[in-house]
Amino acid sequence: MPMAVSLFDNALNIGWIDLSFNLLPNIDPVLTQFENLKILYLHGNVIGELKEVNKLANLKKLLKLTLHGNEIEKIKGYRYYVLSTIPTLVNLDFSRVTKGDVVTTKTWRENNRADKPKKVQYF
């Protein structure tokens, strides 16, 4: 994929990329070079780990993302993980991000913070 960036004269101006149905096992970090990217279709691939979404966190203009049809879609909290990682999204998997999604994502993020102290239960 790195070669793909060099094929475009104005790669920075690309706003929409469709990589759906390509059997991609991960998200290539080269996508972060498209800083004006607004729409990214990655549905129908074989992406299996939620942490792959972290690679897209720096795409500050990303508004629409599709990841349905990947293994990560089956992971509990998938939608809220993606929305918390990429808060600029207004559409995920061809579904509008609602005010309810925003509220639930905020709660989900608070409950799943890595630095949150875990409750110890004594018997």
Image (tube, rainbow, N blue to C red):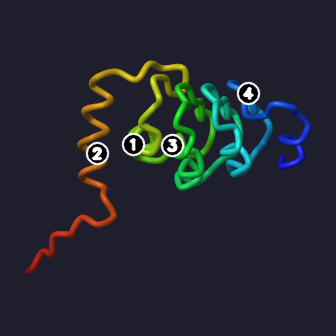
x then y, percent, for residue 25: 72, 50
Residue type, numbered disc 3: Lys
**Disc 3: which residue:** 74
Q: Earlier in the sequence, mark 2 or mark 3?
A: 3
**Where residue 108 is drawn, which disc sits there?**
2
Q: Earlier in the sequence, mark 2 or mark 1?
A: 1
Classify mark 4: helix, strand or loop: loop
Whether residues under marks 4 and 3 lie with C-beta atoms below 8 angstroms apart, the answer is no
Foreground: disc 1 or disc 4:
4
Question: 72 above or below 63?
Answer: below
Whether residues under marks 2 and 1 lie with C-beta atoms below 8 angstroms apart, the answer is yes
x then y, percent, for residue 14: 73, 27
Left or right: 36 as drawn, with respect to 123: right
Left or right: 4 as drawn, with respect to 29: right
Label 1, label 4: how far apart the Cα atoms are:
24 Å
**Disc 4: which residue:** 14
Classify mark 3: helix, strand or loop: helix
Name which residue lies at 31% across and 31% down. 102
Name which residue lies at 76% across and 32% down. 21
x then y, percent, for residue 20: 73, 31
Name which residue lies at 75% across and 45% down. 24
Label 4, label 3: how far apart the Cα atoms are:
30 Å
Residue type, numbered disc 4: Ile
Foreground: disc 2 or disc 3:
2
Q: Earlier in the sequence, mark 4 or mark 3?
A: 4
Residue type, numbered disc 1: Ser
Label 2, label 1: how far apart the Cα atoms are:
8 Å
Q: Earlier in the sequence, mark 1 or mark 4?
A: 4
Classify mark 2: helix, strand or loop: helix
Foreground: disc 4 or disc 2:
4
Label 2, label 3: how far apart the Cα atoms are:
17 Å
